[in-house]
Amino acid sequence: MTKPLALAIALLCSAPFAATAQETSPTGWTGTGELGLALSRGNSRSDNLNGKLQFQNEDAEWKHNYYLSVLRSKGEVSGDFDGDGTPEERFELTANRYEAGASSAIKVNEISSWVAALRYENDDFAPFESQATFSMGYGHNFIKNEVTTLSAEVGPGYRRAKSAETGETENDVIARGLLDFKHKLTDNTELYNTFLVESGDDNTFGQNDTGISVAMNESFALKAGVQVRHNTEVGPATKKTDTLTKVNLVYNIK
């Protein structure tokens, strides 16, 4: 059995047990929990919530990463909802997205690895109501020290996406690329940037997360960042690019 095939089987088998892995074999597992909440009342009303839970483990042979993120927002929306010609205001959902992902890498050496990755998202306000991707490829560490890390992943994959406009499910072979950069400015301040692209004939999806994290102590940190998401193929009434600015409280799980 080849290493890439073994990696894919291991990833698919281990993904459902990501949450219990920390309990049964805590050595080497670390994680973070992020939460951002904003409530506005008065002249306008809005509720915004975003959160992310992430776990990772690395040993001499393997590196695993699992995450779950959520974004929900409610706000005042104006429109003629009953068709009487008079604009009304409603307090409705304006964002509702859930995303889950998993990846496992089997190391060839300290620089190179074979990587398999799964990603699923459901978004009520995106060009694609849902997207599920699986990919396998090559990972490379360009820089890895106590101050700076720079790594990349590239390889082929497969995507199933449900169009929000037509309701049809599209199947597409894709090329996936991931670039991850982190740099410590001080002992408690870190810059980060993560770029993901999934490109196929039907659509090219790109996401870039950039920001800064400041540790207050061993357990808590403040994290500020901007997320930019882009789809090349959208309907006439849909924008191609979405941006999200976040300031979150982060709890380190050790």
Image (cartoon, grey):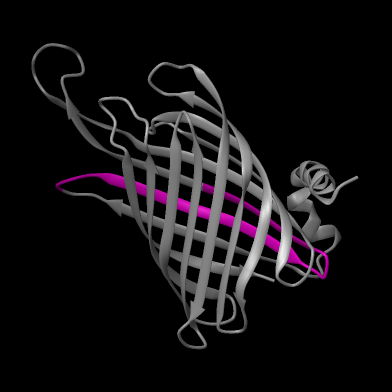
Q: Name above or below for residue 21 compared with residue 199.
A: below
Residue 232 position within the rendered picture, expressed as x and y whole percent measured from the top left: 37, 36
Q: Residue at x 82, y 70 (%)?
A: 60
Q: Residue at x 61, y 84 (%)?
A: 146
Q: Main secondary structure of the magenta part?
A: strand
Residue 115 position within the rendered picture, expressed as x and y whole percent measured from the top left: 71, 53
Quadrant containing the N terminus in the rendered view: top right
Judged left or right of residue 37, residue 8 is: right
Q: Residue at x 81, y 66 (%)?
A: 26
Q: On the image, which quarter does residue 175 sit in?
A: top right
- Residue lying at the far bottom of the rendered structure: 187
Residue 82 position within the rendered picture, expressed as x and y whole percent measured from the top left: 19, 13
Return the residue nearer the eye: 214 or 151. 151
Return the residue nearer the eye: 154 or 55. 154
Return the residue nearer the eye: 76 or 59. 59
Does residue 223 belong to the magenta stretch? no
Q: Name above or below for residue 62 compared with residue 19.
A: below
Q: Residue at x 69, y 71 (%)?
A: 254
- Residue lying at the far top of the rendered structure: 84
Does residue 63 belong to the magenta stretch? yes
- Numbered range of the magenta stretch: 43-69
- Residue lying at the far left of the rendered structure: 85
Q: Name above or below for residue 125 compared with residue 112.
A: above
**How many numbered discs, if any?**
0
Q: On the image, which quarter does residue 9 sit in?
A: top right
Residue 226 position within the rendered picture, expressed as x and y whole percent measured from the top left: 36, 59
